[in-house]
Structures are given as C-alpha cells and as structure tokens.
Image (spheres, rainbow, N blue to C red):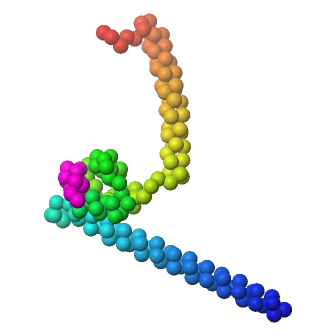
Amino acid sequence: MMCGLVSICSTLSAIESAQNDHTTVVHSILKNKELHLNKLRDLFSNLGDGNGEEAITFATFEEKIKTPDVQAYFEVLGLDVDDAWSFFKLLDLDDGGDVEIEEFLMGCLRLRGTARAIDIGKIIHDQTWQIKNQGKFQTWVEVELRRIQELIVSATGQIPSLHN
C-alpha cells in the first residue's frame, strides 16, 4: 500500500513538473518571438529612408540591403538575403510595389530559418495539383475552341482563319 502511494505521488510530481516545464517553454517561445519582432521593427526602421514612412520601396530596400549593419541584422535573425529582388517579392504579398511593416514582420518570421520537409512537401503537392489542373483546363479550352469553330463553320460555311 505504501509503495503504491509513493508511486502515485512520484507520478503526480512528474506530471506537475512536466506541466511547469511546458509552461516555461511556452513563455520562452513567446519571449523569443517578442524579441524577434522588436529586432524586425528595428530592422524595418533601418531600411526606411528616415522619414518615418509606413512602407519600404524596392529601390530603398535594394540600397539599404547592401549596408553592413542591415546585412548583420538579417544574419542575426537567420535570414539569408542573397537576392534582394526575390526576397522583396516574397515580402510584398499584396504586390503593391512596397512592403508595409506588417508584411515585413510576418514575412521575415515566415522566411527565417531553413526550409522544413513539410514546407518542401507542400510546395511539391501544390505544384503537382497546379500542373494537373492546368492540363485539364487546357484540354477543356481546346475542346471548346473546336466546338466554337464548328459552330462558326455551320453558321457561315467558312472555316475561320487567324490570318486575314
């Protein structure tokens, strides 16, 4: 009986310890995320032209990305920015031609670190789906064009020509 009680107490202690460890890990993650967001805000302000603008243009980004301070910031954040144009386009999700602070923050958080197998798997899956559906669409367009051509021939008696 005493042995069972000790076993139950040690199990409860282990569960409580694990819950505390989990809470500590969650707090650490949140703290690190806030630190990263603050670093990214600093980086964003360094990329701007000093006028307190809400967005960065590609021209400004390309100019500032070459400075050692900005390169060091990106390196500390785990962001590899070899190709300024491609990186900027990945940040500019709305294709507005400039990157607002929210796009910058979320984009940098999304792009930092190395690609995971699940990221690569998702890309392959999406690409396969696109290729398959593009093929279906192309087949449908060809069938419909033939049908339209047949309708034109039956209505006019002439085969439509692309060349006049």
Horizontally, residue 114 falls left or right of residue 101, namely right
Quarter residue 20 falls in = bottom right
> Magenta part of the protein: which range?
55-68
Q: Which residue sits furthest top?
A: 157
Above or below 37: residue 126: above
**Residue lying at 31% horizontally and 47% vertically, measured from the top left:** 83
Which residue is at the front of the view, 155 or 52?
52
Taking the view exactly as shown, the residue that stands out farthest to the right is 1
Of residues 155 and 135, which is closer to you in this image?
135
Query: Is 141 left or right of 21, judged from the image as shown?
Result: left
Is 22 colored magenta in this rendering?
no
Q: Is residue 164 above or below residue 16?
A: above
Identified at 50% across, 34% down, the residue is 131
Looking at the rendered structure, the number of numbered marks drawn on it comes to 0
Position of the N terminus, as image quadrant, is bottom right
Q: Position of residue 119 (x, y in %)?
A: 50, 51
- In the figure, residue 64 lies in which quadrant? bottom left
Q: Is residue 151 above or below residue 71?
A: above
Q: What is the x, y in percent for residue 73?
A: 29, 63
Q: Who is closer to the viewer here, 22 or 155? A: 22
Please name the residue shown 20% across and 60% down the image: 48
Is residue 57 visible from the viewing direction of this image? no
**Which residue lies most toward the bottom here?**
2
Q: x%, y% of residue 31?
A: 42, 75
For the point 37% across and 11% down, which residue is it?
161
Q: Quadrant of the C terminus?
A: top left
Q: Is residue 81 visible in this depiction of the protein?
A: yes
Task: Tell whether position 66 is magenta.
Answer: yes
Residue 74, relative to residue 128: is it above or below?
Answer: below
Residue 82 horizontal/vertical position (percent)? 31, 49
Question: Is 90 on the left-hand or right-hand side of 7?
Answer: left
